[in-house]
Amino acid sequence: MIRSVLVANRGEIARRVFRTCRELGISTVAVHSDADAGAPHVREADTAVRLPGDAPADTYLRGDLLVRAARAAGADAVHPGYGFLSENAAFAAAVAEAGLAWIGPPPAAIEAMASKTRAKELMAGAGVPLLAPVDPGRATEADLPLLVKAAAGGGGRGMRVVEELAALEGELKAAAAEAASAFGDGEVFVEPYVVGGRHVEVQILADAHGTVWTLGTRDCSLQRRHQKVIEEAPAPGLSDELRGTLHRAAEQAARAIGYRGAGTVEFLVSADGRAYFLEMNTRLQVEHPVTEAVFGLDLVALQLTVAEGRPLDAEPPRPHGHAVEARLYAEDPAAGWQPQTGTLHRLALPDGVRLDSGVTDGDTIGVHYDPMLAKVIAWAPSRDEAVRKLAGALERARIHGPVTNRELLVRSLRHPEFTDPGALDTGFYDRNLPALTEAAADGAGVFALAAALADAHGRSRFGGFRNVPSGPQVKTYACGGTEYAIRYRLGRDGLSAEGFPGVRLLALGPDEVVLEVDGLRRQFAVARYGDRVHVDAPPAPGGGATAPASCAFTALPRFPDPTARTEPGSLLAPMPGTVVRVAEGLTEGARVAAGQPLLWLEAMKMEHKITAPAAGTLTALPVGPGQQVEVGALLAVVAETAAAEEAVTEETAADAG
C-alpha cells in the first residue's frame, strides 16, 4: 500500500493529486523551485523539498534531484503529473530503481510512445489507422498544406503549418530549432495537414491483469498555437460507428505496448469522418476532469489503484451527461496570445462549477512557467446546458490581475460554430479570432463612470457630494487602447454625467455603485489595486456578444509625464524572457520589410516572434541570443522608410551646407 506520494510537478496538477491523496489518507510531499517557494501546492503539502534555482532545467526537469527529494522525505511513490518529466522513460526507470513506486505506465511503454515517428511505426503494425508521412525532399504543390511536427514533446511546440512549398525549408529549420530548445531533440517530421479536421481523443485506463478501459471520447478541437483551450466529453456529433472505431483503435494501441495506468490516445478526425492516430500521451491529461465528471470517477485514485497492483473492475461505469472545460490563461488573445505577468489579486468563480487551479489570491504570475491560471469545468445532463453553465460562470467570475482570455472563452462558448457540433474543427480560431477579440463597441463607458464615482466616494468623507456649484469632476481611465474621460457632478440633486443622459445614481459606496441605466438597475462592484481598477457587474440583459460583464481600467494621471516616451519604431520586450535567436544575417543597418521576423523571445514555455512594425531600416539591435531581458527592455529599433530617407536627405543637405 502506498503511504506517501511525492508529486514531481507543480501548480494545478500537484494540488489535484494532493487532493485525492488527502481523501485516501496518503501523506503528500511537494517539491518547489525558488520561484515557487510560497506557491499553493507547497503550502498544501504535508512536507516540501526545495529544488535550488528558478528555471525548469535546474529544478523540475532534474530527475536526480527529484528522486533524492523523494527518498529524503520518506515518500514511497512518485506521481509525475503532466509536463516536465511525466513522459520521460529514464526518470520512470530511475524512480523504480530507487525502490519507489512509479504512478504511471512502465518505462518501456513510455519509451515506445516517446517519439511520434517511432510511435506511428508501432501503431501501423498494430493496425491503428495513420496519416502517411511526407518526404519533405519530395513534397509537391499537390501535397499542400503540410504540417511540420516535432518528434518529441508536445504542447504545440516545434509545430508549423506550411501552405506554400517555398516556405517548407525555413519552417523545418524553425521547428527543429524550437524542438531542440524545448525538448533537447531537434527531430521533426512532415505529414499532411488535414483542413477542417477535429481533434478527438480517447481516455484509457489499464491494469496489470489484462483489463483495458476505454473511457469515452473527448473533443479538444478549439486550440491556439496547437494547444488546447476548450475540451469536452463526450465528443459531440460522432456516429456510433466512428466512436466504436476510436475505442477499438485506442485499446489496440494500449495492448500493443503493454500499457498500464492512465493514458490518452489522440486522433485527427477528418471532415469525411475518417480517424487517424496522432500520438499517445503516456500520462494524465490536463483535460481529465471532463471524463471524471461524465463517468463519476477519480482518475488519480484509479492511478494509485493500478500502481498498487490492484485490478480494475471488468467494466467501467456507464457515462452520464456532458462536461465542458475551459482553460483560463494569463494571456492577451488580441495581441498574439501574449502571456501576461503580475499579481493575481483575486480569482473567484460562482458555485456550481469545478475549479482546478494552481494559484490563489495574491500569487504572482511569473515568467518561468505556463500561463494557465486555472481550469473551469461544468457538468450538466446535456451539452447545451453544460455550455451555458460554463459560459455563465466565466462571465460572472471575479478575475483581478493580469489580462486573461476569459472574455474569449465566453464568446467562444456562445459562438454559433461551437454551439453547432457539426461545425467544430481545429481552424476555429483561425477563422474567428478577430471577431472574438473585438473590443466592446459600447458599454465600457458606464463601467468607467462607476469607477469614477466609487473613487469620488473613497476620497470624500461626505460621500463625494458637493453643496456648492462647481465645474465637473474629471477622471480619465484607459482600457484596451481606449481612453474614457468621465466628467460628472454629484450634488444633492443626484448625478449629472456628460454623455450619460439616461443614468441615475441609486446607491454609492467605495466598493459598490448602483446605477439605473436606461431604466434597468445595475450593480457594479469596484476593486482598486494601485492605479488599476476592476469593475464587475452582472451581464446586462440583451447586451450582445461583445457587451462587457467586467472591465479593468488604468487610472491615468491628470498631467502625463512628457518625458515618458520612446524613440519611434522602438520594439520593447512585452514580458521578461530570453532572446533565443535572431533572424539569420540580421545586423544594424539592414533594410527590413513590414512584418519581417527580427528575433524570437522565449517566456512562459512559449516562443514569441518579434517582427518589424513597418518597412524601414534596423537602426539598433542591442540584444543577442541567450540574453535575458526585462519587460519594457529595448529589443530593436526600426526607422520607417520615409523617416529614414528624410534623415538621410537632411544629413546630405547639412554636409552640403
Image (cartoon, grey):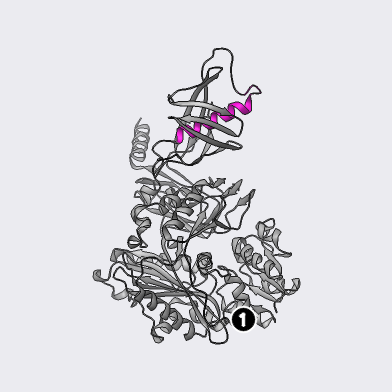
Give the residue drawn at x 34%, y 53%.
416
Give coordinates of residue 412: x percent, y percent. Answer: 41, 53
Give coordinates of residue 296: x percent, y percent. Answer: 55, 68
Question: Residue 62 or 311: which is nearer the viewer?
Answer: 311
Task: Give the overall secondary structure of the magenta segment.
Answer: helix
All told, the count of numbered labels is 1
Give the residue drawn at x 69%, y 72%.
5
Question: Residue 320 or 214: which is nearer the viewer?
Answer: 320
Residue 443 seen:
yes
Residue 445, magenta (yes or no): yes
Question: Residue 638 or 267: which is nearer the viewer?
Answer: 267
Question: Which residues are the magenta region?
Answer: 444-463
Q: Residues within 10 Å of mark 1 (few under 14, many from 20)?
A: some
Q: Is residue 505 left or right of residue 362?
A: left
Q: Which residue is mark 1?
A: 93
Label 1 is placed on what type of residue?
Answer: Ala
